[in-house]
Image (spheres, rainbow, N blue to C red):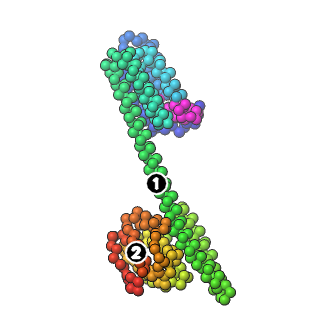
Amino acid sequence: MNFSALKNFDRVAAGFSGIWLVFLLYPLSYLLNNSSFTFTQKVVGLICFLLFSLIYLLSFGAYDLLTEPRPVFKTLYWNLLLLLPAIGLSSMLGGWGFYLSSFCVALWAFHAPQRVGIIVGAVIALVMSACLVFFYRDILFRGGYGFITGSIFVLVMATLSYWADLRREREEELARAQHAEHIARDVHDILGHSLTVINLKAELAAALATAQPEKARDQMQEVAVLSRTALAEVRATVTRMKSPDLAGQLEAARRALETAQIRAHLPEPARVAIAGNNATLFSWVLREAITNVLRHSSARNCWVNLDAERIEIIDDGTKGPFKPGNGLLGLQARVQEAGGDLLIAHGSSTRLLATMNGDTSPLTGPGGSA
């Protein structure tokens, strides 16, 4: 016996299950008001009723009082304990003792593994119904049908609870999968951008190593700073504690484009505030777009334009047929989840537009102004 379970007695579970003990008043009144029973029988019957109620309440409020680790066997043992006073009562009540079987059905339905509990509870209800039909038909028509309907009600409630639990588990599993997908996408966005810039700076440092060692050292110092920043961002993303900052992302875009010898046409830092609540989303859009400009284009110019509900990135470099990769597909999903749309147009130039109001008209064009 695990008596520590009594210290953690679940009053709520015992209360909800104990409500149904009120239906014991009917067989109890039958026992106490029936003149065919002696005083001693009535006292013994009353003790059995009290013991039955106590065991039933303990089975819900202190289920772990029994140390059996296997739920099916633990439920079986609780039912055997419940049968001890039930058998004593049935010896006096006769067929009316089947009234107590509904409580055994409830024990199985709500304590055993749900599918097993419902099946065993249904078997008990069927056996009880068969006994009433074939052996106690007079009791069945004098109110015994309530025993059957009570058991059916318990089984229906347990089945609905089982379906609700299955649905909740599926929703939680889907939420975990989406959470993992979001984290993977965030890590991809961060590392894709940072590693691209680190690679460019490392190549530039290698080219400058002989002719301009001072500039090469400066580039390698920036590589070290970028790698530390990327590591910190990955850790923050995994813990879902940090989102990119639009102003910082614009400055990072400026440095990255300059390193790749691409002329950057960016909004003034003061204009960042216009994005408002869209700033975080636009930061991700900008990060992925600049990464793709650096990786996949031969651009000489890159334009970034911004208003309250749109951000547009255009470059003048092309490299043949265009097919969105995982990064852009993930970005499209992110924008759509936020309630917006992502437009990607590829021709003599590449245009990426994230819009939160459905407006896809150009903010500007190559060589134009915002």
- Tally of numbered tags: 2
Is 187 located above or below residue 59 in the figure? below
- At a point 42% along the width and 76% down the height, the residue shown is 346
Crowd around label 2: few <14 · some 14–19 · many ≥20 (10 Å)? few
Q: Residue furthest left?
A: 141
Label 2 with label 1: CB-CB less than 8 Å: no
- Frontmost residue, 275 versus 299: 299
> Can the viewer see residue 60?
no
- Frontmost residue, 91 versus 235: 235
Label 2 residue SS: strand
Magenta residues, dominant SS class = helix
With 207 as the anchor, is 60 left or right in this view?
left
Q: Position of residue 354 (x, y in %)?
A: 40, 72
Residue pointed to by mark 1? 175
Q: Quadrant of the N terminus?
A: top right
Q: Amino acid at mark 1?
A: Ala
Q: State yes or no: residue 65 in magenta.
A: yes
Q: Place residue 303 in its image quadrant.
A: bottom left
The label shown at residue 361 is: none
- Frontmost residue, 143 versus 355: 355
Q: Give the residues in magenta.
A: 56-75
Q: Amino acid at mark 2?
A: Ala
Earlier in the chain: of badge 2 and badge 1, it is 1
Residue pointed to by mark 2? 345
